[in-house]
Image (cartoon, coloured by chain):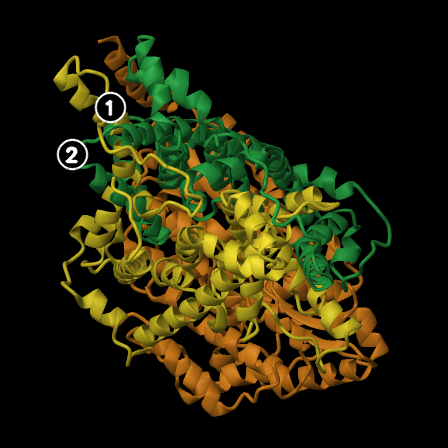
Amino acid sequence: MRRIRAAVTGAVTLSLVLTATACGGGEDSGSSPKTLTYWASNQGASLEVDKKVLQPELDQFEKETGIKVKLEVIPWSDLLNRILTATTSGQGPDVLNIGNTWSASLQSTGALLPWDAKNFGAVGGKDRFVDSALGSTGVPGQDPAAVPLYSMAYALYYNKQLFKEAGIAQPPTTWDEVVEAGKKLGAKGKNGIGVEGSNLSNNIHQVFVLGKQHGADFFTADGRPDFTSDGAVAAVKQYVDLMAAQKIVAPGNAEYAQNQSLSDFAKNKTGMVLWQTPSQTFSAQGMGPDEWGVAPAPVPSGKPGTGKQTNSMVAGINLAVFKNTKNLDGALKFVKYMTSDEEQIALNKAYGSVPPVKSAQQDAAFADPSLAVIRDTLATSAAALPQVPEESQFETVVGTAVKELFADAAAGRPVTTESVRAKLEKAQQQMPKK
Amino acid sequence: MSEHAVRRTAPRSPMAAPRSFLWTRRIFLALLTAFVVLPVYVMVSSSLKPLKDVSGKFEWFPSGLTLRPYADIWETVPLADYFVNSIVVAGAATVFSVVVAVFAAYAVSRYSFRGKRVFTVTVLSTQMFPGILFLLPLFLIYVNLGNATGIALFGSREGLILTYLTFSLPFSIWMLTGYFDSIPRELDEAAKVDGCGPVKALFRVIIPAATPGIVAVAIYAFMTAWGEVLFASVMTTDSTRTLAVGLQGYATLNDVYWNQVMAASLVVSVPVVAGFLLLQRYLVAGLTAGAVK
Amino acid sequence: MTETVVTPPSGRTVRKAAPGEARTPRRSGRRRVALPYLLLLPALLLELLVHLVPMLMGITMSFRELTQFYIRNWSEAPWTAFDNYSVAIDFDAPVGQALLKSFLTTCTFTVLSVGLCWLLGTAAAVFLQENFRGRGFLRTLFLVPYALPVYAAVITWAFMFQRDNGLVNHVLHDQLGIGDSPAFWLIGDNSFWALLVVSVWKGWPFAFLTVMAGLQNIPRDMYEAAALDGAGVWKQIRHITLPSLRSVNQVLVLVLFLWTFNDFNTPFVLFGKAAPEAADLISLHIYQSSFQTWNFGTGSAMSVLLLLFLLVVTGVYLLLTTRGRKTSDV
């Protein structure tokens, strides 16, 4: 009798201990009206920097509304997976940051609260936001899946010292001038322009803009993938040719995915980069704000504008509300707070981005020339990435195709129109069938 | 020969080894040592270099030594929190895994019962499951169990403990069964003569006699839990993130500070490596009697 | 696997304990029957919760159209019969082709990795069998790669494999002058070799450890007898050591095979989410097919196919390696 009891006790104790320890550490996702869980993306130099920027603002919010916000800053490597698993299980945050290019993809899962007129009303109305930023919040014609939080755009950053040494007087404005400047830098033993060949998203951003300049979109008007049009092929080839044909990109850039091109730039090894808001990284790498200059990203000819004169994608972060939130009222209050003029100015200033809120954009903090370039680009010559549900797959398959082409170019294999088309053809066939 | 005692290696031959053998051995071991040591050297030396040394061309020797990275790692990412999480998760998973495995192995080793073969085969075949196949389902089960019972399994340390303890179970049960089999039944019998029941015999006789095997299994369980990446990346939140995810996130930050990454890698490795090397003789003994009979 | 382990040539009498023999006189039949089940219960529950039920759910998922449009409520995802499977094994279409290629890459990789791990491990264990100065130190040192957490080790290798700033190219190109320009290791075709090096570096100490344990079971008098017959060291290794390791090898190779084939951590940490084509191992490929393209149905179907393959290989392997040999009961 006793033995059996001992055995049973063993088994039962174990399960009890497991149960009993199961109290700490768990995440309750805002079931009480007085708390909210907020997933922030990694905007600053590190997760800790983000916490330092955001926490005081969240404390302020708690003071004003009595709602406590539990902050979790999620690295980019995990963010999309975390959102996917949260979507699958219904257990997630109340409010979250999403990369604005994911808007349509996440919208199609139905996990995010649609921003109809009523919800927009709760945060002060849709027309508080800049149009270009609103263009990247979901499939056109549907209620947006998120509201814009931070806006960014690509610009051409150049190393003043290297430009001077190479005798380049003016920052280039067209691609031809970029190549020319790159060759002059090359003659001095420097790299012309840096790319992040193994960074899928970055590849997409660049070839998307080049596609626009060639009059191509990667999706048809009714949302079907169209990766192999002449324009798309030419765009991808032009980008990879910066390394393969023009040789103004160092082959080593093919494996870059962690902003190594920025440290090359800061260390006077590379003369130019096309980037969104790198100033924080430059200073972290020991490069002062007067050592680099900024100009609008290049166009084929003439001045940046719409259509073929597009020179940037609309980059940025959107703020979304998880549909399963048990504290909708609090979540809307929080979105209203985060998009208020005051918070917009404070946060965008801290991150070096531009507020997507019209009234906040006028603040003197954003009149600085380096930010003015971005503000003007967003206002006049930036286009939103395709707002289709398959956007996320598009980034994966086409981004990978470009990465592989860079690997070919770096290994000295020829990159031809045919090889580019073949890679894109393969990418297109990997897209989900409609 | 006692089956469960730590034994000394049998020397091969009393004859002097020929030169060809000695030279082959020297060269082979020298090359192998270089192969093993190289990354360890890189890890240690890079962790002591200033940032400019590690973001430029590789140099064998640092231009200057600095301990800054070791101070900075605690600031750049909340490494201390991750550390606590990893220790709690891996520690608890190890303890429970060993307890569960000892019970199960005892049953398999000492009893015959219906379904024994099915049990052992099933448990061992779980070693073949691709983790990716049950990642999402497991996540859903945890969430639903949580909703039904109020026990937070998803995103909590407990969920991770349950997962990891089960990951190491098949190998542990199998190894301990082998080890228990090698303990002479006469010992059980003797205990029973003294009036011990089967459970008491387990605690009084088998477990003490099987210490090397149990330590070996514990090391294995701890290492499994300490090093797992995939499940940890999806099943943890900010407050429960383990070192495996934390360090992975380190390398994907907006800027990569390689010297800090190396310092952090070293710091998270030291506890496991030290523990492992201290206990390695048990591991060999445990494997000898348990797994490789 | 316990049931397949055979008695080593040591002639050691392993009492495989015919079930239930020599038990104490039964006192209470029912309790006696219940006890082993009670002892197994915790293990059984855990296996059900963490391995078996999720796997069954995974198999169910493989028959559904579980794309981004349905993941929010996956129990309502439409059934698709074998559609996911036919997509996965349609080798004329890119998805199937990519899967096949990844599968073949994984096979080559696994064979090479297991082979090298075994070779290094066995050689090192045999060379360290005899006592000499520094033996204890080397034995400890050789276990370090195994003891290091996977991610810490692989991150270090990734650092070393960088093209422009890494140690590998510094040695190969700058110091030894191999190649016209530094090679890429983390992208392109060389990535396969980079992955193999890391995998072997991580994996061989396990083989070393296991073989070392196996060597301890070889009785000393066999060597002495051989020495008396005039067999030299090489001959002793060939005729005594290696044959004695057969049963150890049987288990070791199988375990290494399963671990290597299913390895996710190494390529994931080394390459990030998109592995280069040349090093696109099946586990990472499936991960990408599920998580990156949000198609969990097809991803699950691929996993099920992988599982079936591993079951068949393991079954055949065990049949072949144990045929004609004495197997124990259980």
Indicate which disc residue B114 carries. Answer: 2
In this rendered view, identify the residue nearer to me: C83 or A205.
Answer: C83
Which shade of the palette goes to chain C? yellow
Position of residue A57 relative to residue C60, above or below, is: above
- Residue B214 percent location from the top left of the image: 46, 30
Give the crowd class for mark 1: few <14, some 14-19, many >=20 residues within 10 Å: few
Q: Are dots 2 and 1 on a single chain?
A: no
Three-letter code, disc 1: Ala
The answer, for residue B28, to whether it is visible in the render is yes
The local secondary structure at tag 2 comes to loop
Which shade of the palette goes to chain A? orange
Q: What's the residue at 26%, 52% (across, down)?
A: C71
- Residue B160 percent location from the top left of the image: 41, 36
Please identify the quarter of the rendering in which residue B188 is found.
top left
The answer, for residue A330, to whether it is visible in the render is no
Q: Which residue is mark 1?
A: C22
- Residue C258 percent location from the top left of the image: 39, 55
Three-letter code, disc 2: Arg
Task: Report whether B21 appears left or right of A383.
Answer: right
Q: Nearer the viewer, mark 2 or mark 1?
A: 1
Please identify the quarter of the rendering in which residue C295 is found.
bottom left
* Chain identifier of the green chain: B
